[in-house]
Amino acid sequence: MKKSYTIDYKSNDMRLDRWIRNHLGKIPQSLIEKSLRFGKIKVNNKKTKSSYKVKTSDQIVLYNFNFKEKIIQKKIKFEPSNLIIKENENLIIDNNNDFVVINKKAGISVQGGTKSKKNLVDIFAKSKIFEGTRPYSVHRLDKDTSGVFIMAKNRETAQLITSLFRLRKVHKTYLAVCHGELEKNTGEWSNELIRYDNNKEIREKAKTIFKVLDKNSMCSLVEMKPITGRKHQLRKQLFAIGHPVYGDQKYSLRNLEKGLNKNLMLHSYEIKFMINKKKYTFRALLPDYFKKLLKSKRLSFSNF
C-alpha cells in the first residue's frame, strides 16, 4: 500500500509533522518519528526529519502504513503499570474528596507527549485513588522537576483550581541549586522570555521573587517564588544571569563541567492557595539526590 501527496503552495514552509497531522488526523508524534526513522514516510524519495519544512511541489510518500489502525491498537493495548502506581501512591502528600497532592518524582511527565511513555495522568488513571472518576491535570511541572503537584478528582474542582492559577492566587515556592555565587541575596527578576511557536517568535513578560538561602564560591541555594507562569521560566531566568541550574541539559553554559550531576536540581517545594475561605499549604520533601548535592557542596537548608 502506497499513498503519494504533492505539497501545494498553501502548505509551503510548514513542518512535516504538522503537515501530516493537518492532512491525516491526530497522529501521535512518537508514531510519526518512528515512521520517518524506518523510511515509511519519505519526502522526494528520501528519509527526512519531522522538523523538515515542506516546500511547494515536494512529494510525500507513505509506504505500507495504516495510521488509524495503529492508533486504535495502541489505545487498546495501553495498561498503566501497577508497580508504578504503587510506587507513586507512597508519595501522596494529601488525598481528599476533591484533589490529590503528590510529591512528583523527577523523570515523570505530567501528561502524555512526544517522548513521555510514563506520565502521571495515565499512571493514576487506574489507581484506587481515582476509583469512579479520573485524574484532571490543573497545572504544569517539567518532566525533570520534582515536587508538589496537584491533580483534581472532578471537573468542577479542576476548573476552580485552574482559575486560581490563572488569577495568580496559587503561590508556589521552588528551590534550586545553581552554578556560581549570586551577587544579590534577595530581589526580583523581571524580564522578557522568548519562545517559538511554528517559527513565530513570542515574547512573554516573566517575574520571579528570589532569595538566596545559602551560597559559596561554587554554587547557590535559591528560593524562588514565580509571579508569572511561563514555560521553563525559572530555568531561563537563572541561565540569563549566568547561573544555570545544576543538571540542566537545556539551559547550560559550555564551560561548566558536563556530567557533574544527572538530575535537574529544581524542586517544587511548597504550594499555597485558598478554597472557600480555607487555606491550604502543602510541602514536598527534597529528593535524596538533592540533599546529597547540598551536603557535598556544603549548602545549608534547615527544612529537610
Image (cartoon, helix red, strand yellow):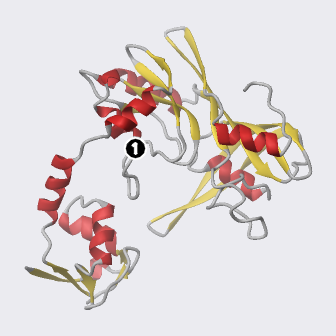
Q: Position of residue 221 (x, y in %)?
A: 80, 41
Q: Is residue 142 visible?
A: yes
The C terminus - image quarter: top right
Image-based side of 303 in relation to 286, left or right: right
As drawn, 174 above or below 127: below
Query: What residue is drawn where x is 40% and y is 52%?
Result: 116
Q: Position of residue 112 (x, y in %)?
A: 36, 48
Query: What residue is drawn where x is 32% and y is 62%?
Result: 29
Q: Which residue is at the front of the view, 256 or 225?
A: 256
Image-based side of 74 in relation to 16, left or right: left
Identify the image quadrant of residue 286.
top right
Q: Residue furthest left?
A: 1
Which residue lies under the disc numbered 1? 119
Image-based side of 252 in relation to 85, left or right: right
Q: Which residue is at the front of the view, 18 or 246?
A: 246
Type of amino acid at the residue the image marks with label 1: Asn
